[in-house]
Amino acid sequence: MDVLVINGPNLNTLGTREPEIYGATTLADIEAGLVTQGQSAGLSVATFQSNHEGEIIDRLHAAREDGTRFIIINPGAFTHTSVAIRDAFAAVAIPFAEVHISNVHAREEFRKHSYLSDLAVGVLTGFGPDGYTMAMSYVIERFSKE
């Protein structure tokens, strides 16, 4: 597998969850667009969403075994709380981009800290669903140079 897209808690409710913040695009729409974008560049893309921290950690561990070369993750609220997901990224040593639909720096104070950002290749925040597309564009460009 080339690219794994992971979405954390509550992102399965996109399209209906606080549309004034997150918009009307569903997670299924985002995932389908990323799969199409990646496949058009010859990349295999898998998606995964969970509301459970341990399942995300288990999927990260599995990514090391299945040959995943890059991860795009929107960790949701786990961004601000999960040392365990941070440790899993450190353990698997797979490069990743952190994506947030809203501008977390323009929101509540607690959202301004990420346990993952310093490990990430890059962070996209506040671009809505386009942040995912931008991350995939980066991955496509990165792989074209290998």
Image (cartoon, helix red, strand yellow):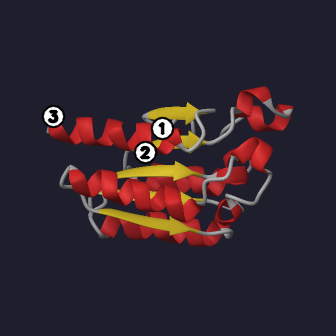
SS for dot 3? loop
SS for dot 1? loop
Is residue 42 or residue 90 the one in the foreground? Answer: 42
Q: Report the Cα–Cα distance between label 2 and label 3.
A: 17 Å
Residue 79 lies left or right of residue 68; in this view the side is right
Q: Decide if residue 113 is in sight here.
A: yes
Are dots 2 and 3 in contact, CB under 8 Å? no
Residue 32 lies left or right of residue 102; in this view the side is left
For the residues carrying marks 2 and 3, which lies nearer the camera in this image?
3
Within-10-Å neighbours for mark 3: few <14, some 14–19, many 20+? few
Q: Which residue is mark 3?
A: 145
Are dots 1 and 2 in contact, CB under 8 Å? yes
Q: Quadrant of residue 136?
A: top left
Within-10-Å neighbours for mark 2: few <14, some 14–19, many 20+? many
Q: Residue at x 40, y 54 (%)?
A: 34
Is residue 84 or residue 69 the one in the foreground? Answer: 69
Q: Residue at x 68, y 38 (%)?
A: 102
Residue type, numbered disc 3:
Lys
Q: Is residue 98 above or below residue 4?
A: above
Q: Which residue is mark 2?
A: 96
**Quadrant where the N terminus lies?**
bottom left
Q: Looking at the image, tell me whether mark 2 or mark 3 is earlier in sequence order.
A: 2
Q: Quadrant of residue 111?
A: top right
Q: Report the Cα–Cα distance between label 1 and label 2.
A: 5 Å
Residue 118 lies left or right of residue 23; in this view the side is left
Q: Which mark is residue 120?
A: 1
Residue type, numbered disc 2:
Phe
Q: Residue at x 43, y 45 (%)?
A: 96
